[in-house]
Amino acid sequence: METKKLFDLDSYITKFSATVLSCEEDSKKAGNYLVILDQTAFFAEGGGQPADKGTLGAANVSHVSEKAGVITHHCDKALEVGSLVEGSIDWDVRFPHMQTHCGEHILSGIILKEYGFHNVGFHMGKDFTTIDLDGELSAEMVLNVENLANKAIGENVEVHVSYPPKEELSAIPLRKKPEVDNLRVVEVDGYDWCGCCGTHVARTGEIELLKIVDFQRYKGGTRLFFHCGKRALQDYQMKHSMMKALAEEFSCKPEGVADAVHKLQQDLNDVKSQLNEKNKLLFGFLGEQLKASAPDVNGCKWLFLYGGFSADEAKTFAMNMAKQDNLFCTFFMPAGGAVRYALSRSKNVDSLSTKTLCQAMNKALGGKGGGNDDLCCGSLPNLSEEELKKQTSLLLGYKSMKG
């Protein structure tokens, strides 16, 4: 027997009584019980909307599912079959779902009317609610539908839920008509008509606010990310706080933060450019010093460097040195509790391969990384300079190296 849905025509029901028809322990989750009632105000997950939460007597309801019209309550305590139980819906979970689902109807109806695109996917997630469309929206179009949606919210029009007889369905301009018998229709007065199973507010003003926080191309169409109600307000408050902090940091007005960040980026690029020029000189001087004291290994000079640079600088240094003849470079940079490495060789060195050394080093010392015969990069555990010299010399077959 299908479970009677008390929320079906009244999403505001939060208290109810029901008879326990069955209670079985969940074979997939220890300490969880699957409870079926003769009627319920709990919305089961479906149609892109998460399930309600709440209590049944002394049991907490963590999830609600539905199959073939039968609603199952996932509880943390067993309930006596045949007993009368009092149910309570967690309004702090239910109401945001009502706001968001109704906001989705308004957005989808407006987008179809304005641009002819259909909603082909809807999901209320933990961090965002998304709508997938079968057409591409521009930034200007997104701003337009957001403004129109909030206009609809401000008009505080009615939201109707009904089961129209079949002879009346053909006259209703349904945006989406699921192929089901006894179709439940949600109408947002003047904005949307759609077959839907979810919970909704009674008037659009209860949505309070709708904010599209992002959009992107998705499968040839558009995916919108949005918030409604309290979540939209919290998102604005968080971003306003961040913007205010940035404005104070840059000693400018909030509207000037973008320009300040742009200038900072330009200044940073200038500093990087100057640093790169200085590094070229430094690499040249240091390279000559390393070559002067470098031992010969298999017909080439082995350059060993530990510390003094970032991993990226060491990689650049190694690549630059490899442009010279008869050099094999092993550079190690301690950082964040590990040691980053860059290995390179000159084009005329055939006796040694950075790839072979990289693989041997990773295996012997527990490292990660890769590359080719001319350049490899990766990381190793936090070994000392002395230990790295010793291990690298052994792996290279240079057993006479000291210190």
Image (spheres, rainbow, N blue to C red):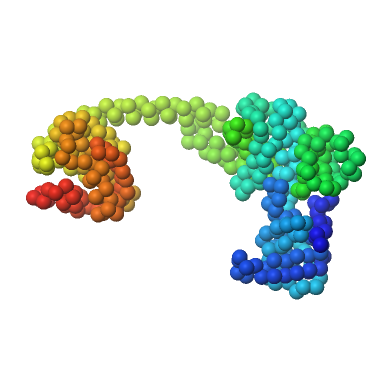
Say which quarter of the image contains residue 191: top right
Left or right, residue 162 beside residue 340: right
In the image, 389 versus 237, the foreground residue is: 389
Horizontal and vertical percent for residue 72?
72, 62
In the image, 57 versus 32, the foreground residue is: 32
Q: Is residue 220 above or below residue 7?
A: above
Horizontal and vertical percent for residue 50?
68, 51
Horizontal and vertical percent for residue 207?
74, 42
Horizontal and vertical percent for residue 335?
31, 47
Residue depicted at 67% across the width and 40% down the height: 121
Number of callouts: 0
Q: Is residue 193 above or below residue 85?
A: above
In the image, 38 versus 43, the foreground residue is: 38
Q: Is residue 222 above or below residue 71?
A: above
Say which quarter of the image contains residue 285: top left
- Residue 332 showing in the rendered view: no
Left or right, residue 395 beside residue 233: left
Say which quarter of the image contains residue 208: top right
Residue depicted at 59% across the width and 38% down the height: 240
Quadrant where the N terminus is found in the figure: bottom right
- Residue 78 showing in the rendered view: yes
Residue depicted at 81% across the width and 68% down the height: 19
Q: Residue furthest left?
A: 400
In the image, 272 versus 287, the foreground residue is: 287
Residue depicted at 70% across the width and 49% down the height: 49
